[in-house]
């Protein structure tokens, strides 16, 4: 009976599948946060002393030029796995590939995070629907929000559909689920920690930040 009740609640919340399968987290991932910052996400809670030490981060462009961070701030208040790395204004070019290497960062228990004490990942600056939000939506949201099964009367299978009204369509003052620049629009709220789609879709903190940074900082650009 309890299982049936739980399934009913999830369907009423607008998702045809009980859960989007949880994928294994990479040891290191990086996402563009703004024109001068990257969000760096690890798969373990962090020792903040090492994780916020700028000397442990190396960012290089495709020709090997190095960009030195100015400061690092812990932003993940839920899991303690994500930091924001800041750079001088103008140091990062929009829509450009960079390589990030992190060395010597430890977990909250004092153990090295990486077997070789360092790890490298590529990051593409700037957030747009075409990249990387479309891929994120297809993996985490569109299985439940598509033309065949519009959970909550809302679809995420195209850029245009993101601006739909969903379950708010019949209210006296409907608001689109996506409003460029609005940190309180439903797409941002529902994908934020503690809210429905953050939990159902197994979003990481870094993925949640991608939604708010795309909507607010990058004005939900295509």
Image (tube, rainbow, N blue to C red):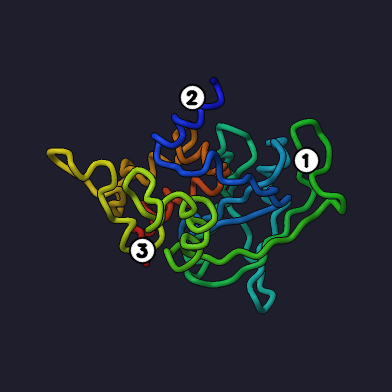
Residue ID for mark 1:
106
Q: Is residue 99 left or right of residue 198?
A: right
Residue ID for mark 2:
5
Label 1 or label 2, whichever comes before in sequence order: 2
CB atoms of marks 2 and 3 within 8 Å: no
Label 2 or label 3, whichever comes before in sequence order: 2
Residue 196's disc is none
Q: Give the SS element for disc 2.
A: helix
User: Real-space Cα distance between discs 1 and 2?
Assistant: 42 Å
Q: Position of residue 183 (x, y in %)?
A: 34, 44
Q: Position of residue 184 (x, y in %)?
A: 32, 41
Q: Residues within 10 Å of mark 1 (few under 14, many from 20)?
A: many
67 or 75, which lies in front? 75
Residue at x 40%, y 41% (from the top left corner): 14
66 or 8, which lies in front? 8
Q: Is residue 215 left or right of residue 101?
A: left
Residue ID for mark 3:
159
């Amino acid at each position: 009976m309890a299982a049936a009740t739980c399934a009913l609640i999830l369907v009423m919340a607008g998702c045809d599948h009980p859960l989007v399968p949880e994928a294994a987290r990479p040891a290191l991932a990086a996402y563009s946060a703004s024109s001068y910052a990257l969000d760096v996400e690890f798969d373990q809670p962090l020792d903040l002393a090492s994780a916020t030490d700028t000397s442990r981060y190396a960012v290089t462009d495709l020709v090997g030029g190095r960009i030195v961070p100015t400061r690092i701030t812990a932003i993940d208040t839920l899991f303690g796995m994500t930091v924001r790395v800041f750079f001088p204004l103008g140091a990062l070019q929009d829509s450009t590939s960079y390589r990030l290497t992190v060395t010597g960062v430890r977990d909250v228990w004092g153990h090295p995070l990486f077997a070789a004490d360092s790890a490298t990942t590529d990051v593409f600056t700037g957030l747009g629907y075409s990249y990387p939000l479309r891929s994120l939506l297809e993996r985490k949201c569109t299985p439940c929000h598509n033309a065949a099964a519009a959970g909550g009367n809302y679809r995420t299978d195209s850029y245009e559909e993101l601006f739909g009204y969903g379950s708010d369509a019949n209210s006296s003052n409907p608001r689109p689920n996506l409003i460029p620049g609005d940190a309180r629009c439903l797409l941002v709220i529902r994908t934020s920690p503690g809210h429905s789609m953050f939990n159902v879709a197994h979003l990481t903190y870094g993925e949640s930040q991608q939604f708010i940074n795309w909507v607010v900082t990058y004005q939900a650009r295509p």
